[in-house]
Amino acid sequence: MSEKPEIAADQPSAKVIVLVLLLGLLWGGNSVSIKIGLQDVPPFALATMRFLLGFAAITLWSLHQRVQLRMNPGELPPLIFVSLIFTLQIATLNLGTQITEASRSTVFISTYPFFTALFAHFWVPGDRLSVRKTVGITLAFSGVLLTFGGNLNFATHDYLRGDLIVLLSGCLLGLRTVVTKLIIQSIHPYRLLFWLMIFSIPCFVISSLFLERSANIHFSISGVSAIFY
């Protein structure tokens, strides 16, 4: 039996490294912005608003870059699969963050690199889980734990349900990262994002209409800022 070819993994340039670090910095405030937004808007409605903005941005940028957004033959199954993972991941992140603290949510969603490395070890040819990689991931998570872990109190069960839901979101995020890595070998990243939102936004809208009809929605300056974050 022949071995699977390794997935291409080019060495990142300095520009890419800086952009990744910037995204990591912004990612650190994601759970905080979600928690702030949830003070004004319930979980599924919040997801709808945030990703409608994201959909508009990616559509305009794709058109500007003249990227083909039309789906090619054979792309529907993988796009539906990754969209399902994405929808569940965002839903669990918002729902879990609603019933736990922002600092706890940040810690538990930051477990996703462990899940990413684990899934990649089995699914991505050439991306094996090495000692060096494990040490690096552990050190990175330790930094998050040192930064936000001061507010963790595992003696109380008040936030346990929310913590576990966010942990599930971290697992789904790791899975989505690996599946995306595999899919973008044949689908342009912008087209992937476009269809991912096409499939997921209606799910958030329907969930909000059925499950959040009695929710009190209002908009504060901080809440609107969190939606745009």
Image (cartoon, rainbow, N blue to C red):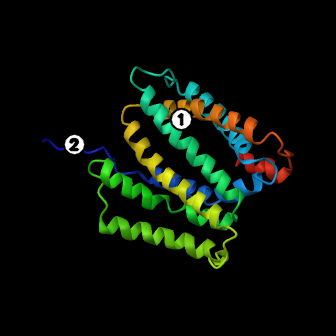
Q: Position of residue 39 (x, y in %)?
A: 80, 54
Q: Is residue 66 left or right of residue 124?
A: right
Under mark 2, the amino acid is: Lys
Image point (43%, 21%), residue name: 72
In this rendering, the answer to whether 101 lies above or below 36 is: below
In this rendering, the answer to whether 199 lies above or below 161 is: above
In this rendering, the answer to whether 93 lies above or below 203 is: below
In this rendering, the answer to whether 15 lies above or below 190 is: below
Between residue 179 and residue 132, name the one nearer to us.
Answer: 179
Who comes first in sequence, dot 1 or dot 2?
A: 2
Under mark 1, the amino acid is: Leu
Image point (49%, 22%), residue name: 68
- Considering the numbered disc 2 on the image, is that residue within a helix, a strand or a loop? loop
Q: Is residue 210 left or right of residue 31?
A: right
**Crowd around label 2: few <14 · some 14–19 · many ≥20 (10 Å):** few
Residue on which the image places disc 1? 193
- Residue 101: name its quadrant: bottom right
Q: Is residue 57 left or right of residue 126?
A: right
* Residue most extreme to the left: 1
Image point (54%, 62%), residue name: 110
* Quarter of the image where the N terminus is located: top left
- Considering the numbered disc 1 on the image, is that residue within a helix, a strand or a loop? helix
Between residue 19 and residue 126, name the one nearer to us.
Answer: 126
| Nearer the camera: disc 1 or disc 2 | 2
Q: CA distance from mark 1 to mark 2?
A: 27 Å
Q: Position of residue 183 (x, y in %)?
A: 40, 37
Image point (81%, 53%), residue name: 222
- Residue 78: name its quadrant: top left
**Crowd around label 1: few <14 · some 14–19 · many ≥20 (10 Å):** some
Residue on which the image places disc 2? 4
Q: Position of residue 59 (x, y in %)?
A: 60, 29
